[in-house]
Image (cartoon, rainbow, N blue to C red):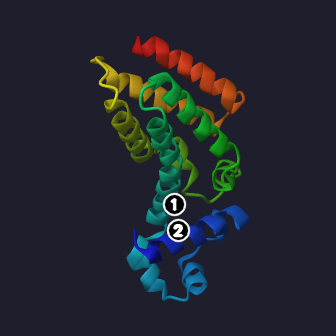
């Protein structure tokens, strides 16, 4: 990413958390960053592409927590899974951008919520690729590893979107399920 793109995404995230997606316009971003509106368009595309870029940038922050957890537990797969799930859910719990997107009112003019709920192909593929990469270090002899990764990623994503317990309790449950799947 370029410094300008990073700045555009940061200002966009701040506007979303403070005022909602409807407050984000290319003109406003240009004014905030002291660049032309065309420069903003050249850097991020139109508003739908900006929405996707914001969501994917935030996903990168979540996935860093996953890779860090696996790096911290190179010899213990279940400890790595537990730490990754717990870290992700704790981060989600306090994530103002995520809460702003998820709490968008019904029928609101937002292109962000569908990226997290119904149009999740890019998000899921990116997350599954990252988790698969983390699991490769453990040389698991499971032919259905793609299925295991899909189940884990979708399960954790559902708890990010709608938690049903504490991060610690959910991490315990996901780790238990992972142990069964990986046995």
Q: Secondary structure at mark 2?
A: helix
Query: Is the residue under label 2 in contact with that under label 1 (CB below 8 Å)?
Result: yes
Q: Check disc 1: other Cα within 10 Å, few if <14, some if 14-19, many if 20+.
A: many
Image vertical order of residue 71 relative to residue 96, above or below:
above
The mark tally for this picture is 2
Q: Check disc 2: other Cα within 10 Å, few if <14, some if 14-19, many if 20+.
A: many
Q: Does label 1 or label 2 sit earlier along the sequence? A: 2
Q: Judge from the rendering whether residue 183 lies leftward or rightward of residue 98; answer left or right.
A: left
- Residue 133 at x, y = what percent? 34, 37
Q: Secondary structure at mark 1?
A: helix
Residue at x 63%, y 38% (from the top left corner): 89
- Residue 84 at x, y = what percent? 53, 35
- Residue 68 at x, y = what percent? 49, 43
Seen from the viewer's position, the closer of residues 14 and 46 is 14
Seen from the viewer's position, the closer of residues 138 and 155 is 138
Identify residue for label 2. Answer: 9
Image vertical order of residue 40 relative to residue 168, above or below:
below
Q: CA distance from mark 1 to mark 2?
A: 6 Å
Residue at x 55%, y 16% (from the top left corner): 176
Residue at x 57%, y 69% (from the top left corner): 10
Res. 144 image quadrant:
top left
Seen from the viewer's position, the closer of residues 66 and 53 is 66
Which labelled disc corresponds to residue 68?
Answer: none
Res. 123 image quadrant:
top left
Image vertical order of residue 127 relative to residue 170, above or below:
below
Q: Judge from the rendering whether residue 157 lies leftward or rightward of residue 145; answer left or right.
A: right
Res. 146 image quadrant:
top left
Q: Quadrant of the C terminus?
A: top left
Identify residue for label 1. Answer: 54
Q: Quadrant of the N terminus?
A: bottom left
- Residue 41 at x, y = what percent? 43, 77
């Amino acid at each position: 990413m370029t410094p300008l793109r990073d700045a555009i995404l940061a200002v966009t995230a701040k506007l979303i958390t403070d005022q909602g997606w409807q407050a984000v316009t290319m003109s406003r971003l240009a004014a905030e960053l002291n660049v032309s509106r065309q420069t903003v368009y050249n850097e991020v595309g139109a508003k739908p592409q900006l929405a996707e870029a914001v969501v994917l940038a935030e996903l990168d922050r979540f996935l860093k927590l996953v890779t860090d957890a696996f790096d911290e537990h190179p010899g213990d797969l279940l400890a790595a899974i537990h730490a990754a799930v717990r870290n992700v859910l704790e981060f989600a719990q306090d994530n103002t951008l995520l809460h702003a997107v998820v709490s968008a009112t019904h029928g609101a003019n937002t292109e962000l919520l569908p990226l997290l709920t119904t149009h999740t192909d890019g998000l899921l593929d990116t997350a599954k690729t990252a988790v698969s990469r983390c699991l490769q270090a453990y040389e698991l002899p499971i032919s259905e590893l793609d299925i295991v990764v899909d189940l884990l990623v979708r399960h954790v994503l559902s708890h990010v979107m709608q938690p049903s317990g504490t991060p610690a309790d959910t991490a315990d449950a996901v780790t238990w399920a992972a142990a069964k799947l990986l046995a």
